[in-house]
Image (spheres, rainbow, N blue to C red):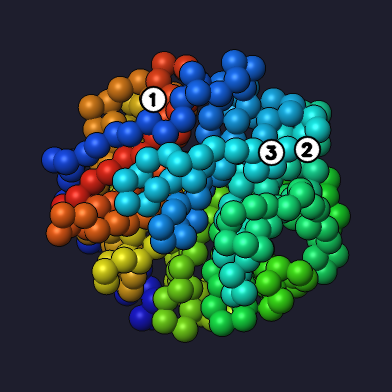
Amino acid sequence: MRQLLLFAFALITSLGNAAQVVPSHKATHPLVTAADVPAATPYLAFPALVDLGADVLVSFKRGRSHGGDSGAVLDVLRLDAATGKVKSRQPLAALGDQIMQMGEWVRFPNGDLANYIDAQQKAAPTRTGLRVVRSRDGGATFGAVERVGVVDGVEYGYAFEAISEGQTTWMLAMTFTNLAGGKTVYPPRPVSGSVDVIRSDDNGKFWRFVHNLTKEFGDHPINESSFVRHGDGFIVAARGYDNRQWLVKTDGAFHLQRKLNLTAANTFIKSHIGRPRVFTRDGGWYLLGRNSTDTGPMRLSLFRFDPETFAITKHVLLDNAEGANVTDGYYAAPYWRQREGKTWFNLITYKGLAKRAPDIIRLESDWEEVR
């Protein structure tokens, strides 16, 4: 009964009532554009970052199109964290004619950094199995591309996010029917399988299966997901193939405690949130990602929410409040820096206008205004 009352309260309080903010200060800084890379690979997208303190590492795809572009690679930027300026750019991962489609950073308990890659090929079936590159010197150098391989009978294809605590690292990853152990979960997407939690207690040398989130959450067709620690459990944000966006509370073993369909509960969310990232900062709980607020172009949004009810209490239009023709973009990752007595909210994302190849950009806002 208590869970039903909380659900009803969240639904009532979140329906279109969140304060909507467009930051008065927003600076846009191009980091890499088509003019900066070889003409054969002008498409730049899907950035992910790891904050190292003095530097920020940003991985991104460099290819010819959103997908299906054989030979696409991952590059890595090293940013000066104080200024946000690019210090260096170099290749991170390439694998012949395969497509290095997405990269996600993991910081292991022993200090190693790794980037887990959604390796693909142009021909169907597209997924070829999760790959990884690793640095054992704090991100100064990286080793060769390696195959993660089979985890308790399953080979994963797409890693979303990881949390390291003590000697344990949890990762969210997705199965695919053409890879070992992959099974069709929902007929509308016969290639994609479940989103699972896997775990390593030896800095990623070996992984083991923990829980099937797709099944646990009610067999909703979810894919890109993010999670953050909440008390003894977790809060998970999950994007649905069916144009629904979920927030879910679990216990420490990833068993469902509460869930809410944000798309149904909020008038300013018309579909899923593209590449959602959920995080907490300065006592607040936030969901970041690409949002379709109406039938017009995509926008980049930040939602502050109540972790107990999932009611959204603030909606910040971080980019494209003006409604420009953004046709590709807005997978985004945040970091923060102090300057001139203020905290600045930095986002690394990608953005393409009018079907032109997108750029990798940095957006900067005043955190006190945004939060």
**Dot 2: within a 10 Å radius of its alpha carbon, few (fewer than 14), some, or many (20 or more) residues?**
some
Instruction: Examine the image and state in which quarter residue 189 appears.
Output: top right
Instruction: Check if mark 2's residue and mark 3's residue have beta carbons within 8 Å.
Output: yes
Q: Can residue 51 be seen in this view?
A: yes
Q: Can residue 185 be seen in this view?
A: no
Task: Give whichever of discs 2 and 3 has the lower sequence position.
Answer: 2
Residue beneath the point at 56% across and 50% down: 224
Residue beneath the point at 32% across and 56% down: 336
Give the amino acid at mark 3. Met
Which numbered disc covers residue 326? 1
Task: Give whichever of discs 1 and 3 has the lower sequence position.
Answer: 3
Q: How far apart are marks 1 and 3 (CA)?
A: 24 Å
Q: Distance between the residues labelled 2 and 1?
A: 31 Å
Front-lying residue, 67 or 180 = 67
Instruction: Check if mark 2's residue and mark 1's residue have beta carbons within 8 Å.
Output: no
**Dot 3: within a 10 Å radius of its alpha carbon, few (fewer than 14), some, or many (20 or more) residues?**
many
Q: In this view, does 162 lie to the left or right of 52?
A: right
Query: Is label 2 in a helix, a strand or a loop?
Result: loop
Front-lying residue, 214 or 20 = 20
Query: Is label 3 in a helix, a strand or a loop?
Result: strand
Task: Give whichever of discs 2 and 1 has the lower sequence position.
Answer: 2
